[in-house]
Amino acid sequence: MNFSNEFILFRQTAESLRRIGARGGRAYGRNRRARQKLQLSVALPVLPCMPPTEESTAQAIRTLDERFPWLRGVERRCDARQ
């Protein structure tokens, strides 16, 4: 924090506060346009899309059964009559 500008907004007239705010708005807009221009000029290379690997439900169940043998068969519903 710059302590020399600590009280910049105190003891100011309404007109000087408006000017301070307008300068900030212009600076913000100028900086934003500069950033946008910079982003447009530096285009990133487009990477080709890789199709997602498709895994069937049965393959996923098989993989889970191999990793967690104590959960084997939990995907089957229990018969309510038992």
Image (cartoon, helix red, strand yellow):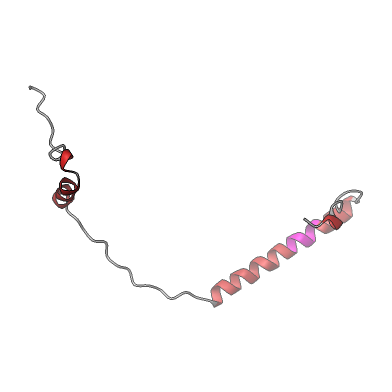
Judge whether 29 appears above or below 42 on screen: above
The residue positioned 14% from the left and 40% from the top of the image is: 72
Q: Is residue 15 left or right of residue 61?
A: right
Queried whether the magenta region covers residue 40, the answer comes back as no
The residue positioned 88% from the left and 56% from the top of the image is: 16
Judge whether 64 appears above or below 37 on screen: above
Queried whether the magenta region covers residue 25, the answer comes back as yes
- What secondary structure do most residues of the magenta stretch adopt? helix
Q: Residue 23 at what x, y percent from top left?
A: 79, 62
Q: Residue 35 at what x, y percent from top left?
A: 62, 69
Farthest residue to the left: give it: 82
Q: Who is closer to the viewer here, 6 or 42?
A: 6
Question: Quadrant location of the N terminus?
Answer: bottom right
The residue positioned 76% from the left and 60% from the top of the image is: 24
Span colored in magenta: 21-26
Q: Residue 70 at what x, y percent from top left?
A: 17, 39
Q: Residue 79 at what x, y percent from top left?
A: 9, 27
The residue positioned 13% from the left and 33% from the top of the image is: 77
Q: Who is closer to the viewer here, 47 or 30?
A: 47
Q: Who is closer to the viewer here, 81 or 72?
A: 72
Q: Is residue 46 left or right of residue 68?
A: right
